[in-house]
Amino acid sequence: MAVVEVHNIEGKPVAQVDLPDAVFNVPVKPHVLHTVVTMQLANRRSANPKVKHRGDVAGSTRKLYKQKGTGRARRGDIKSPLLRGGGVIFGPDGRLYTRQLPKKVRQLALKMALSSKLQDRALMVVDRFDIDPIKTKTFVTAIKALNLKSALIVTEAKHETLERSSRNVPDVKVLRSEGLNVYDVLKYDTLVLLQPAIKTIEERLIP
């Protein structure tokens, strides 16, 4: 197991913690990380516009009037694209960009992302992040003490004071361990784990 120092919000080391090798010491394969990040970004895309064609419009298929003898055009049903309220000709059919990967692949990629942060010495453990009352200035002071510029802070559960104090600070994101994902881990320069979050991450990734 890797041993990492635990800091307080003043930036001073106060203890040490063991990180499980099954989560934080996994061989990193860039192509796996690329595949999962591509999937995440694709799933965030909105679908293209979609129109209703003749077969998609709700309406009767009864012929409007007889074929001959009226002097009018040969109408089929009320869903004809030539009539008001009918289908659309040659319109876009819509496109979904969503992708799916096996759960084991997504979990493996998350382990790789966490391992890469530890290997690059871009992982920090903080014992707790108590901010009371909710105040952005207090949070910024703590961030400066920890020497963080671009950071993802992972909490074990809902941490309202921390989340609300940090939401106006650029290049910093607070994320609960249940929402931890490969894209956010790789996007920010430093990964900051609150010490209780290590256990919840381990329970999530180790069956």
Image (cartoon, helix red, strand yellow):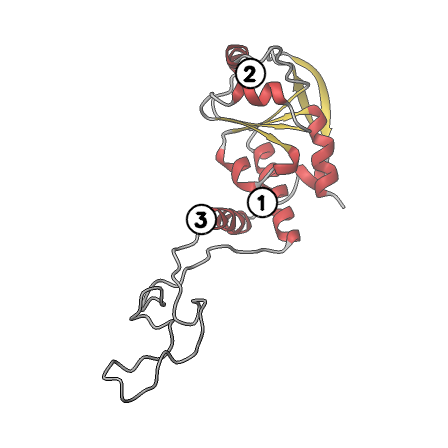
Place of residue 54 in the rendered image (x, y in percent of width and height, measured from the top left): 39, 71
Looking at this view, name the residue that lies furthest to the left: 71
Residue 80's quadrant in the figure?
Answer: bottom left
Q: Are dots 1 and 3 in contact, CB under 8 Å? A: no
* Labels 2 and 3 touching (C-beta < 8 A): no
Q: Secondary structure at mark 2?
A: loop
At label 1, the amino acid type is: Val
Q: Say which quarter of the image contains residue 134.
A: top right
Q: Which residue is mark 3?
A: 45
Question: Does the image show residue 190?
Answer: yes
- Please report the residue visible at 63 percent of the width from the left and 42 percent of the height from the top: 111
Secondary-structure class at tag 1: loop
Can you say whether 49 is above or below 81 in the image?
Answer: above
Residue drawn at point x = 61 percent, y = 18 percent: 161
Q: Is residue 145 above or below residue 205?
A: above
The percent position of residue 167, horizontal first and vertical second, equals 51, 23
Front-most of 203 and 77? 77
Instruction: Say which label, 1 or 3, has the lower sequence index.
Output: 1
On the image, the x and y values in percent for residue 165 come to: 54, 18
Q: Which residue is mark 2?
A: 146
Tell me the SS state at disc 3: loop
